[in-house]
Amino acid sequence: MEDMLITQSVSFEYNRDIQFEFPDLSVRKGADLLILGDSGVGKTTFLHLIAGLLRPKTGSIKIGDTDICQLHGKRLDTFRGEHVGIVFQRPHFIQSLTLEENLKMILYLANKPQDSCHIQEILKGLGLLDKLKRYPRQLSQGEQQRASIAVAVINQPKLLLADEPTSALDDKNCFGVIELLKRQKFKSKSSLVIITHDQRLKSEFAVSVTLPSNHVVPSTI
Ligand SMILES: Nc1ncnc2c1ncn2[C@@H]1O[C@H](COP(=O)(O)OP(=O)(O)OP(=O)(O)O)[C@@H](O)[C@H]1O
């Protein structure tokens, strides 16, 4: 089976005192990976590196056949827009647009048809069909969480990344969101990488990697 994500010898630093060396990953097409780690060990940083939102100091990150570290500027943005879906820790919406308009905007930016049937099908699967014409501020927190999954999967990305999608949720909603992510992943035939400190998810995924807590080099005073 084909690999969808391979990272090798990835390191990163925000500054001299905050440096990271990340484990090598390989995720097959259609497979899942859970990345666990305590608060502050660099989970969001790693996810942003995989998404090409940050650039590593060393190493390579391959999505499909493309080494994203070799892409820059517009080419990187276009590649991400077409192939990577991100469920951010805090939902990102354009507040002046309705949910439907937000989704149309993402399709437009990715040069994909703004197909209303496709949008409705995704929202139906997430139980949000009746919220189509609502503005983001008119959605409850749980609805915003589900809407952020719609934002991430609307392009049918081959790699779906989720940053702490469940840590603020109670058990019922936590397992509900995982179910939705898995279902959407299955529909889009994509690979799913979740980063979290939420230990409840361990039982939901066959493969997990734990980031060690010794990434941050302590400041010398
Ligand atoms: N832009 C930045 N500049 C400097 N340091 C940063 C920056 N962003 C994050 N850090 C530091 O890097 C470390 C890792 O941050 P990161 O957000 O990746 O951790 P995390 O494991 O996702 O944490 P949490 O689970 O609390 O969200 C933290 O010590 C954080 O303070």
Image: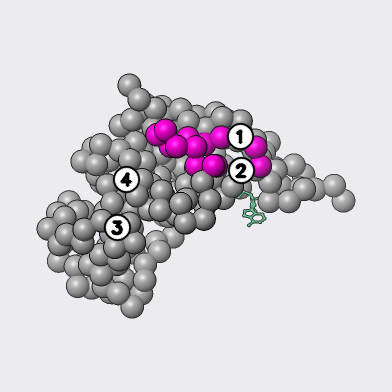
For disc 2, the marked residue is 56
Q: What kind of residue is marked 3?
A: Asn
Where residue 84 sits: x, y (%)? 38, 47
Looking at the image, residue 200 sits to the left or right of residue 177; the answer is right
Q: Residue furthest left?
A: 117
Q: Is residue 165 visible?
A: no
- Counting from the top left corner in percent of width and height, residue 25 is at 50, 29
- The location of residue 199, given as percent across then percent down, is 45, 38
Callout 3: few (<14), some (14-19), or many (20+) C-alpha neighbours within 10 Å? few
Disc 2 CB within 8 Å of nearest ligand 1 atom? no
* Whether the residue under disc 3 has CB within 8 Å of ligand 1: no
The residues bearing labels 1 and 3 have C-alpha atoms spaced at a distance of: 30 Å
Determine whether the residue tagged by mark 2 lies in a helix, strand or loop: loop
Q: What numbered label is drawn on residue 182? A: none
Q: Amino acid at mark 4?
A: Pro
Residue bearing mark 4:
157
At x 47% / y 56%, what residue is drawn?
74
Mark 2 and mark 4: Cα distance apart in space: 22 Å
In the depicted structure, whether residue 159 falls above or below residue 104: above
Which of the two residues, 43 or 152, is positioned nearer the viewer here?
A: 152
Q: Which mark is residue 59?
A: 1
Q: Which residue is mark 3?
A: 111
> In which quadrant will I find the N terminus?
top left
Across the whole image, how many numbered discs are drawn on residues?
4
Q: Quadrant of residue 168?
A: bottom left
Q: Amino acid at mark 2?
A: Pro
